Image: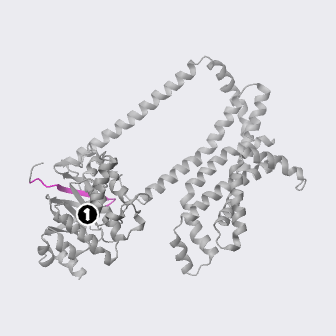
């Protein structure tokens, strides 16, 4: 922030400016101290309220047992690896199906009416149905058809995730496509680019940029919902924790799984914050408001 | 504030963008009821100067006084300072989700705490004055550029600011719409507003300005009456700038 000295030090700030810099520095230091102080007070109060509650000792023994936590960690980690694999596959599926749906919904012309209607119905249905229900229907229903042979539960879990999240992502992308100013389409078409190329080279890149924070948010949400595949019997982090809980009557493995899911989502959450902040800075050119 | 204290006093204002000085020690007074016009090439610092006066940019050195109050003091409440200054931007910046009347009454209702009837009475009076009394319920995108800019001026005037800053307010307008906006500024001058404006319209500057200020590379090169600056510029840089405009 020290812009005065930027000019190879030949510029000495006036006494007034030095005073202002000093004042701002004191103010900054004060704000930091206040924020640290208020955070500490808040943490202490929460801690006191927790430990003073009558059942705290039992809760601590059955949810926060360090011994159990340490012993359950390897098993839960192995389970988490399953979650990560399913997530990786599902993300690709969502990207493809979501984009197709979004484009289908924005197609113009009477010929595409059935496509538009189908895509619209799809997003309506899959945004309305709870993910858990889709998991049950896909995971226990489709194998019953006996078409695909025996597939692991992870496979059906990934399919269900893709079906649900594609509907959300399609709507986000559609909002982005519609937010690209029509003059951009005109400019691209006037160069002789066809409909598809206009979409691919001009509209989609701008659309994705506009809705990146929303897409990242959906990804974070998907990272935790991938834990729901445990209801199909897939031995993921949650299922492993459940097995451990059943054999020890101690709930600490659940807490371990929860912490691992948080750790898994942290990088993406930070990345989303950073990206949004950068976009905000770019839009406000040099303002202090 | 004493009778002959300037409404605005800029003292040695410096502003850097990285290594680049955009304002390099500007001194400028604007007296009550005076219209001061800033001219100069793009990047000469006109807009930055207006932004520092409205506290949209923080100065890196120097001081700015509004009616005697040091508004560059970090202790002052910037929002309160801005409420005393009216600003009109190049691109109107009307709020598209509000009717024309709501645009004009927003600051009165939410900054000065006026009741809706009081703010609307003031708003309608201003819209009458700018000749758009019948468009109060319209939304901005139904208006022409010139009309929008006149509404933006009305919005800036709604709170009876001590000083009006106009930043290239005709640059985004079609040539045939420039006249109506400049005529309105002429009327404001006749009514006694204190105005600091940046413009590329030299003929208008000549007609309406009490004083013309020529900026180049963040420095105040020359100032004087329109006759002095346009007919008998003293500095080579001023002559060259005006010659290029032809």
Q: Residue furthest top?
A: A54
Residue at 57% over, 64% down: A178
Q: Is residue A218 left or right of residue A163?
A: left
Is residue A259 on the magenta stretch?
no
Up-down relation of residue A189 to residue A65 (above or below): below
Which of these two is toward me, A288 or A165? A165
Of B104 and B240, the residue lying toward us: B104
Place of residue B131 in the rendered image (x, y in percent of width and height, measured from the top left):
29, 67
* Chain assignment, label 1: B
For image coordinates 58% across by 64% down, the residue present is: A177
Please give left or right for residue A184 compared with residue B3 in the image. Answer: right
Q: How many marks?
A: 1
Which residue matches tag 1?
B129
Quarter of the image holding residue B168?
bottom left
Q: Quadrant of residue B198?
A: bottom left
Percent of width and height locating residue B112:
29, 46
Q: Measuring 75% from the left and 29% from the top, which residue is drawn there?
A: A245
The answer to whether A286 is drawn above or below residue B173 in the figure is above
Q: Is residue B17 magenta?
A: yes
User: What colour scheme has been applied to the protein in the rendered image?
Assistant: one colour
- Tell me the SS state at disc 1: helix
Q: Which residues are magenta?
A: B4-19
Q: Is residue A151 visible?
A: no
In this orientation, which residue lies closer to the viewer: B153 or B78?
Answer: B153
Query: Is residue B38 depicted above or below A63 in this figure?
Result: below
- Within 10 angstroms of label 1, few (less than 14), some, or many (20 or more) residues? few
Percent of width and height locating residue B243: 21, 81
Q: Is residue B14 visible?
A: yes
- Residue drawn 42% across and 30% down? A37
Q: Position of residue A123 (x, y in %)?
A: 69, 56
Considering the whole magenta stretch, tell me its main secondary structure: strand
């Amino acid at each position: 922030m020290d812009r005065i000295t930027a000019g190879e030090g030949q510029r000495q700030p006036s006494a007034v400016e030095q005073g202002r810099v000093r004042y701002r520095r004191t103010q900054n230091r004060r704000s930091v101290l206040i924020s640290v102080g208020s955070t500490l007070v808040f943490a202490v109060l929460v801690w006191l309220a927790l430990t003073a509650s009558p059942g705290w000792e039992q809760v601590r023994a059955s949810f926060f047992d360090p011994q159990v936590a340490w012993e359950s960690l390897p098993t839960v980690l192995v389970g988490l690896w399953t979650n990560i694999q399913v997530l990786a596959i599902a993300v690709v599926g969502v990207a493809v199906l979501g984009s197709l749906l979004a484009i289908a919904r924005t197609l113009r012309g009477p010929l595409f009416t059935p496509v538009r209607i189908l895509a619209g119905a799809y997003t309506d249905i899959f945004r309305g149905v709870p993910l858990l229900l889709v998991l049950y229907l896909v995971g226990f229903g489709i194998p019953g058809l006996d078409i695909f042979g025996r597939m692991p539960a992870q496979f059906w879990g990934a399919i269900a995730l893709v079906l649900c999240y594609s509907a959300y992502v399609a709507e986000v992308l559609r909002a982005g496509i519609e937010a690209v100013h029509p003059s951009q389409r005109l400019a691209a078409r006037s160069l002789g680019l066809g409909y598809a190329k206009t979409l691919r080279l001009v509209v989609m890149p701008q659309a994705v940029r506009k809705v990146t924070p929303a897409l990242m948010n959906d990804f974070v949400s998907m990272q935790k919902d991938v834990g729901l595949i445990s209801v199909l019997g897939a031995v993921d982090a949650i299922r492993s924790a459940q097995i451990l809980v059943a054999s020890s009557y101690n709930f600490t493995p659940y807490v371990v799984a929860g912490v691992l899911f948080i750790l898994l989502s942290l990088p993406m959450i930070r990345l989303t914050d950073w990206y949004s902040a950068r976009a905000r800075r770019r839009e406000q050119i040099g303002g202090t408001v | 504030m004493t009778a002959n204290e300037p409404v605005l006093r800029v003292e040695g204002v410096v502003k850097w963008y990285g290594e680049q000085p955009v304002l390099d020690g500007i001194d400028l007074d604007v007296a009550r009821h005076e219209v001061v016009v800033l001219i100069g090439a793009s990047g000469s610092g006109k807009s930055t100067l207006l932004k520092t006066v409205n506290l949209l940019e923080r100065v890196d050195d120097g001081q700015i006084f509004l009616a005697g109050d040091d508004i560059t003091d970090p202790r002052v409440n910037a929002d309160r300072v801005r409420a005393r200054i009216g600003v009109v931007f190049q691109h109107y910046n009307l709020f598209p989700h509000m009717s024309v009347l709501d645009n004009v009454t927003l600051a009165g209702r939410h900054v000065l705490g006026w009741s809706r009837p009081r703010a609307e009475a003031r708003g309608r009076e201003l819209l009458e004055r700018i000749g758009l009394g019948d468009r109060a319920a319209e939304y901005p995108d139904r208006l022409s550029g010139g009309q929008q800019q006149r509404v933006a001026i009305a919005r800036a005037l709604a709170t009876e600011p001590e000083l009006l800053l106009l930043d290239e307010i005709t640059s985004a307008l079609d040539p045939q719409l420039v006249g109506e906006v400049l005529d309105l500024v002429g009327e404001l001058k006749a009514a006694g507003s204190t105005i600091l404006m940046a413009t590329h319209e030299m003929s208008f500057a000549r007609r309406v300005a009490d004083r013309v200020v020529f900026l180049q590379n963040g420095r105040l090169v020359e100032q004087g009456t329109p006759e002095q600056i346009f007919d008998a510029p003293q500095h080579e840089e001023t002559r060259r700038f005006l010659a290029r405009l032809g």
